Amino acid sequence: MKKSGLLILILALLFSSPVNSQDQIDKKSLAGTWMGRLNLGAVYLRVVFNLKINEYDSLIATLDSPDQGAKNIPTGKTTLEGKNIEITVPRLLAEYSGIVKNDTLIEGTFRQAGKVLPLDLIRQPKTMTFDLKRPQEPKPRFPYSSEEVTFSNEKAGINLAGTLTIPEGDGPFPSVILITGSGSQNRNEELMGHKPFLVIADHLSRNGIAVFRYDDRGVGQSQGTPLNATSADFADDVRAAFLYLGTRKNIDPITIGLAGHSEGGLIAAMVASDNPAIAFVISLAGPGVPGDQIMHRQNIDISRISGVSEKQMKLNISTNKKIFSVLQKEPDNKLAEEKITGVYKKVLVKQKTSPEEIDQALKQLNTSLNPVSYNWMRFFIATDPADFWEKVSCPVLALNGEKDLQVTAEVNLIAIEKALKSGGNYNVITMTLPGLNHLFQNCKTGLPAEYGEIEETFAPDVLKIMSEWIKGL
């Protein structure tokens, strides 16, 4: 099928009508679906532009990123002058510039965060619809019940909403609270078309373990806002969830545990460090070293596999260290923003970056690190998880993927085990799982760009490890 499809595409190009460079393209002729691939070094990322004419006879577009599980991303202005087409994507701080070569090919470039990548678009034979293949997503009938619940974090003055899945039978059942990673996540920890917490909850509840997962602050049906919040605030949400589960008659109050992914692993350690009633902790790619070390190593690992030069990597690390230093030394977020902008602009000027690219790069910086996230970043880069792990007295299962490029297994698992044992807790199992990435998917490179491409949501072997370990406690 792949070969015949390629043959059809080549024939279409051979017999398409050329475009005279002086002609004004009829915008109606561009209506349809156009797809290209961005070469990111280790992987390719598909980009789809859906062009159509609106009621005002103007050309408009939406953007799809099939490999990242994103559909109908709104774009800004779409302009067509002669054979030149430009599409702005403000949400991504990006833009596409192309030249219409014929009725099936647009040659162009995709600009984002100061980077310029070739992106040639091929017209698709029909409107493209992509259904993400996620074979692990649970389908009824379910041998457990699901209950939508709300609980209160009285300290923050907010209500949070979640789903409690309860095995069949009378109970009381052991239970686990799932804690999401960094960023605003819903109760399924949904990203790039995957719902890992839904898959985990389904597996554990099929194996006699109740699971409580909830929407983060300001997400879904939960109140509050993540703005200016830190991991310490999110830990309070977990404490509130723990108190709520303790009121349920079908939940065994002495076997309530925590399972945190990525930053959620840190939060689990924080909660368990001062609550001996926590029955167990599962760290899924959780940090064992301070956040600044994690982020520097993440930068190096992802950059190296992506083909970034050693010189550029060193510059990136140097720049990040300067930015982190400003955050740690300047408590006033407004002043910190000014100083960070100045630091970054100075680096860009030294690289002889053009004014246009500097402006774009500063906008991108503000998108990825803006004042409302300064409190979180300050806490994360300065906090040593070991300070909490060494106070955790319950059994701990710490898992990491061998190809995890975001929270490196070799560094963080050793640190977690060392901290636990230094505090007198030898009831710990650490495992580096071959071939798995940060999301515990079987993968090729471990790069985040692969997450959406992979059909597997969460490796079945890891699900089995989790359920058997909990049941064996």
Image (cartoon, rainbow, N blue to C red):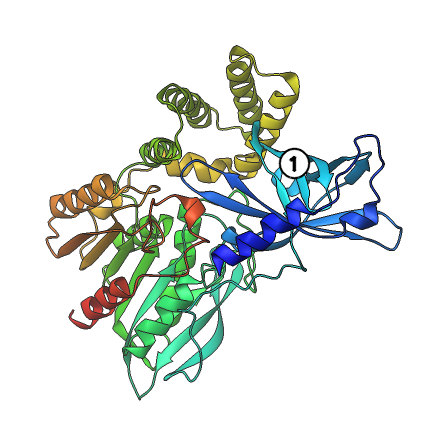
Q: Is 373 placed left or right of 94 in the picture?
A: left
Report which residue position mark 1 lands on: 107
Q: Is residue 213 above or below residue 39?
A: below
**434 shown above or below 338:** below
Extreme residue toward the bottom, this view? 170
- Label 1 sits on a secondary structure element that is strand
Name above or below for residue 465 compared with residue 340. Answer: below
Nearer to the camera, 109 or 164: 109
Mark 1 burial class by Cα count in 10 Å: few <14, some 14-19, many 20+: some
Q: Is residue 156 visible?
A: no
In front of the other: 230 or 454: 454
Q: How many marks?
A: 1
**Amino acid bearing label 1:** Glu
Which residue is painted at 40% across and 34% down in the image? 306
- In the image, what residue occupies the spot 53% across and 60% down? 158
Q: Is residue 378 or residue 109 the one in the foreground? A: 109
In the image: residue 438, left or right of residue 219: left
> Could you tell me which quadrant the C terminus lies in?
bottom left
- Left or right, 119 with respect to 210, comes to right
Q: Position of residue 23 (x, y in %)?
A: 84, 34
Q: Measured from the top left, where is residue 322 in percent x and y?
A: 43, 21
Q: Position of residue 20 (x, y in %)?
A: 80, 34
Among the 4 quarters of the image, the one containing residue 446: top left
